[in-house]
Image (spheres, rainbow, N blue to C red):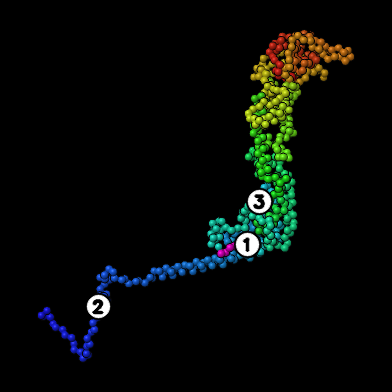
Amino acid sequence: MPNEPQHKAPASTTTTQPTPPIPLKAAAASRGQHAAAHFSPAAQPADAPKEKKPRRAGRVFLIVFAVLVALTLGAYGAGVYVFSHHYYPGTTIAGIDVSMMDATEAATSLTNETSAYTLTVEGDGFTWSYSPESADEVFDMQKAAESVLEANDALAWPIHLAAALSNDSQSTEEEPETATIDLDAEIDRSLFAPTFDEEAFVSDVQTAVDTFNEQRSGAFDAASSYDAEAAAFTVEQARSNEKLNRDNVAQLALASLARLDTAASLDELGADAFEPLAGGLTDDDLAEACDAANELLGCNVSFKLGSSVAATLDGSTIAGWITFDESLTPTLNQEALTTWAQQLGQSFNTVGTERTYTRPDGKQITVSGGTFGWTVDVDAVVQAVQTAVAEHQTGEIDLPCTTTGDVYTGAGQPDWGAYIDVDISEQRARYYDASGTLLWETGVVTGKPDGENNTPTGVYKINNKLRNITLVGQKDPETGEPEYESPVDYWIAFIGSSIGFHDASWQNPSVYNNPKAYRWAGSHGCINTPYDKVAELYNMVQPGLCVIVHN
C-alpha cells in the first residue's frame, strides 16, 4: 500500500549463492511438513495418518496377572507342602479323627485311642467281630499313619480340601465297593505288628463261618427257596441256602484288617463269598424248578364248618408241602399234607370234647363225651386239597366231615342249635329251640346209679324213632335169656339203639315227680318218660336233634 513502510533486507558481506530449484514432489512434502507444524489435528485432512499412543493399560494387566499367578502358585505350593505332611480335615484312621495332624501325631493318637478297635465282617445273615485287647498288638501305628498320609494325594489338595470342608472328607472308613477284593492279590502286612498272630485270627474267622454254615445245607430245596414276602419260589431265595466260603471270608477279614477298616461286607466278595450249591446248579436250572413250583401255588380256598371258616388254604401253606425230586420236579409231600389234615381235625373235632354252656334258666353246665359234633374226615380232606391244588381252585369248600354239628363257634363252645337237656341231678328233661325258648319239659327217671345201669352222660343226637317195639335186654349168661323184654309204644333212641326215651307203663306215675326215685326205681339206662309226654316229644323231634345228658 502507499503508506506502508518499506522493509529492506540487511546488507551482508556474505556472497549469497543462488538457491537451486526444488523438485515439485519435494516442495509439496516441504509444504506439508510446514503445515503440520502450524495447524492442529482437527484441521488436518481426513485421510491424514494418526500417531500411535503407548499401550500402558495392557502392560498393567500383564503385571497384575503375573502377580496373581505367582500368588496362586505360591498358595498351591504351600498347600502341597502342608498336605504332604498333614491329613485333610475329616480324615479318620480306625475311627480316630486325625484331621490336620502329621504322621507322628496321628500315630500317638491312634496308640492312645484305639484300645477299643473292632473289625466287623457281616453280610447275608453272617456277623463276626474281632476286638483285640490292644490295637498296638495288631498294628504298627507309625507305619499305619504314614501309609494313610502317603495316600493323601497332596497334588490334588484343592479338590480334597473342598470335599473335606463340605463333609465329604477322605476317610479310611468309606463304604467298600462291591467285589473290590482281589483274592489273588497279596495282602500288605506291613502295618501288622510283630506280635500279631495271623494264624489265630484266620482260624477264628473260619470257625465262625463253619458255625454259620451249620444252618445251611448247601443244597437246593423247597424250604429255603420260598420267599414269603414275594409269596413265590425265587432263584435269589434258593441261593440263600449256599454255604459261605470259609477261606474267602477269612481273606476278606485279613485284607480289611490290613487296611485298618472297622467294617467289611461280604458284598465285597461277590459270588466268591459262597460255595456252589450241591450239583453245581445254574441259575437257569433253579429258575425252571422255581417256575414249576409256583404253578402249584394258585389255589386259594376256605374250608368251612357250618357258617364258620375253619381253615384257609393258600400258596403260603402249600409252599410248605412242596418238595423237589432228583430231576427238580416239584410235588406235594403227602406226609406233610396228611399231618396238616390231622392237625386240622384235632383242632376242629368236637365229638366227645368238653363243652360248656349256660342253660336258659341260668344253670351253667360242663359236659364231655357223646357222639354229637364235628369229626373231620382226614382222608377226604387230603383228597380235597390235592384236587384244589391241581385245579387251582378258589372260593369256599365245606370241610369234609364224618359227623357234623349244627354250628361251629370254637373249641369248648356249644355246637348245637335246638337240643334236649336231660339233667340227671334234677331228674328232668327239657327241649329248647335254637333261640333258647322252652318247648317241652317233664320229669323223668334215668338209669339206676349202681355202676352198671347208669345213663351215660355226654352230647348225643337222636338216631331214630320208632312206634310199638319191644325193648330186649342183654342175655343172662346163666340162663341164656334176655334180662328183660319190655314192649313200648314210643321209642326215641340217641345212643345207638340201646338208650333212648320211651314210655314205661310199669312205673308208678309218682316217680316222675320225685328227683330221688331213680336211685331205687331207675331204668337200665334209658330215659323213662310219662306216656303223654313221650308221645308229645315223639311228634316234635326228628333224627339228628342234639340230646345232652349231664349231672
Which is closer to the viewer, label 1 or label 2? 2
Q: Which residue is mark 1?
A: 148
Quadrant hosting residue 498:
top right
Which is closer to the viewer, label 1 or label 3? 3
Quadrant hosting residue 510:
top right
Specify whether 295 is left or right of 463.
left
Q: Which residue is mark 2?
A: 24
Quadrant hosting residue 385:
top right
Q: Which residues are magenta?
A: 151-155
| Residue at figure coordinates x 48%, y 67% from the top left | 69
| Residue at figure coordinates x 62%, y 56% from the top left | 173
Q: How far across and how far down the image is residue 315, in percent?
A: 66, 35
- Name the secondary structure under disc 2: helix
Disc 1 packing (10 Å; few <14; some 14–19; many ≥20): some
Residue that sits furthest to the right in the current view: 478
- Name the secondary structure under disc 3: helix
- Which amino acid lies under the numbered mark 3 shown in the image of this protein? Gly
Magenta span contains residue 15: no
Q: Nearer the viewer, residue 315 or 43?
A: 43
* Residue 127 drawn above or below residue 66: above
